[in-house]
Amino acid sequence: MIGMAIVVDDYPLYFDASNEKGLSMAGLNFPENAYFFPETAGKDNVSPFEFIPWILGQCQTVEEANELLPKLNLVNMNFSDELALSPLHWMIADQTQSIVVESTKGALNVYDNLVGVLTNNHTFDYDLFNLNNYRHLSPTVSDNKFSDRLELNVYSRGMGGIGLPGDLSSASRFVKAAFTKLNSISGDSEPESISQFFHILKSVEQQKSLCDVDEGEYEFTIYSSCCNMDKGIYYYTTYDNSQITDVDM
């Protein structure tokens, strides 16, 4: 498998990864909603920090991953005394489908992900429902439906997207990423596809100092990545280097 990780004591703590069959997985921040359980007899007890290699080390497809999830118990077990668990939820995808896995106080929830997008906080079912509020958005401009007694003009291109969120909240970034992804068009070549992918991610990237999380500390997009699932080529950029770098597994 290949991916982005912090390596602690020679152990990779993956943010995202893909295996040689193309199955891919990413963990995203899920504070206040994530809940991990005590060890349970009769379950596959897995700590969240080992969830990505546990899936990618034995599954080739989302279907195979789905077969393991009913027995899964994500255990409240820290990596070490110095390194506590991160509250996460996960997206798992292959070449044809995607799912979201969330461990909350109620249960382990698995959702079909038809939009192919996951952001941070809010549970996935909320983010999907919230898309109903933006059903009026369109890449094209509609006729005047406000009133037949007013002449309202199309004075600019892109007015079909008025109301598309642009703030940095997770719910807004979900809407913008989903709208951008589902309406974008890419060419058939590898360079065109990779270029378009990073343009989609850049539509929701976070810049330094716009999201203050503590005095002098900011949330920002440290890196962006994708993987050609068929060829095993991992692409990434970093905040300080926008050149797309690839690593061929």
Image: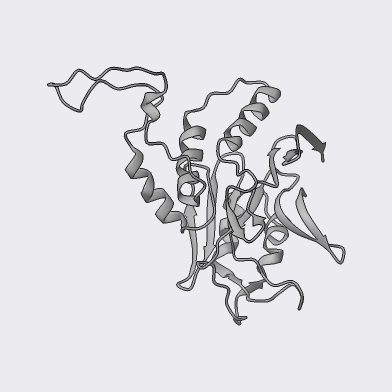
- Residue 148, compared with residue 212, is above or below; it is above
Instruction: Name the foreground residue: 19 vs 30.
Output: 30
Q: How many marks?
A: 0
- Direction from residue 163 to residue 241 in the image, left or right: right
Rendered residue at 67%/21% (across/down): 189
Display coloring? one colour
Which residue is outermost to the right? 10
Rendered residue at 35%/39% (across/down): 134
On the image, the x and y values in percent for residue 58 come to 71, 57
* The C terminus sits in image quarter: top right
Q: Quadrant of residue 36?
A: bottom right
- Residue 35, compared with residue 90, is above or below; it is below
Instruction: Name the foreground residue: 232 vs 225.
Output: 225
- Residue 73, compared with residue 215, is above or below; it is below
On the image, the x and y values in percent for residue 154 come to 32, 17
Which residue is outermost to the left? 149
Q: Quadrant of residue 80?
A: bottom right
On the image, the x and y values in percent for residue 127 come to 43, 51
On the image, the x and y values in percent for residue 68 come to 60, 62
Which residue is outermost to the front? 215
- Direction from residue 65 to residue 174 in the image, left or right: left
- Direction from residue 130 to residue 41 in the image, left or right: right
Q: Quadrant of residue 198?
A: top right
- Residue 182, compared with residue 113, is above or below; it is above
Instruction: Name the foreground residue: 117 vs 162.
Output: 162
Rendered residue at 60%/20% (across/down): 187
- Direction from residue 74 to residue 247 in the image, left or right: right
